[in-house]
Amino acid sequence: MIEGGKNYEAAEAERVLDDRVYTVRDIEALPEGERAELIDGKMYRMATPTLTHQDILMWLSVKIWVHIEKHGGPCKVLPAPFAVYIKDDEHNYVEPDVTVICDRDRLDEKGCHGAPDWAIEIVSPSSKTMDYIRKCALYEAAGVREYWIVDPKEKSVLVYNFEHGTSGRYSFSDQVKAGIYDDFFLDFNEVA
């Protein structure tokens, strides 16, 4: 249950604009400052992130960026808001909290065209169904190699390594290995 006794599906339903089929052009036409995501033509409003969410977002982005800088390689880390045209079609557009792209040919000034290598979502009460169900299915189907769901309230990290068909749940007291790198662990004790 979440605040006010609402269940997750009810909280998510408040984020759905209506039953019409939307396109990327509708996302791009939103007023300045208004953010939404698009999954199979359905548009979902995005809530303003909390301080805890932003702290974790910055921590993850910096840690990943430092690792990439130290070890080199083609990967690039980009924090939200950053446009990911996940299926490179008209009906799917997401803004993962943290996006890692290793094929720089997928990048242009508008965003990432196609699946990133690693997507991380930081859960809020209103995004549980979106992050755990809808985005998980979308990311797997689109070819994302690795997907992390960081849940600050539960102090847990759910890791899906789609590339190798594995998953695991970790607590913030664990060091979590990034599957797309051989030697990279994140110590969530630092943000707990």
Image (tube, rainbow, N blue to C red):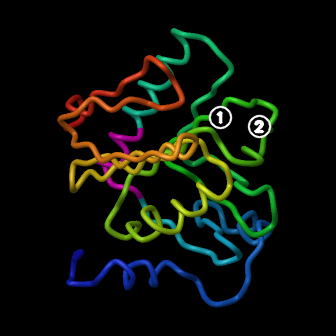
Residue 53 colored in magenta in the image: yes
> Marks 1 and 2: in contact by CB < 8 Å?
yes
Neighbourhood count class around disc 2 (C-alpha, 10 Å): few under 14, some 14–19, many 20 upward: some
What range is drawn magenta here? Answer: 49-57
**In the rendering, at what x and y percent does residue 60 appear?**
41, 33
For the residue marked with disc 2, what is the amino acid? Answer: Leu
At 73% from the left and 44% from the top, the residue drawn is 111
**In the rendering, at what x and y percent does residue 134 appear?**
52, 68
Residue 143 colored in magenta in the image: no
Query: Residue 92: which quarter of the image?
Result: bottom right
Circle 2 sits on which residue?
107
**In the rendering, at what x and y percent does residue 143 appear?**
66, 49
Q: Is residue 70 above or below residue 89?
A: above
Q: Is residue 151 above or below residue 47?
A: above
Q: Is residue 84 above or below residue 108?
A: below
Quadrant in which the C terminus appears: top left
Secondary structure beneath dot 2 equals strand
Circle 1 sits on which residue?
101
Along the polypeptide, which appears first: circle 2 or circle 1? 1
**In the rendering, at what x and y percent does residue 142 appear?**
68, 55
Tell me the mark number nearer the camera, choosing from 2 and 1. Answer: 1
For the residue marked with disc 1, what is the amino acid? Answer: Ile
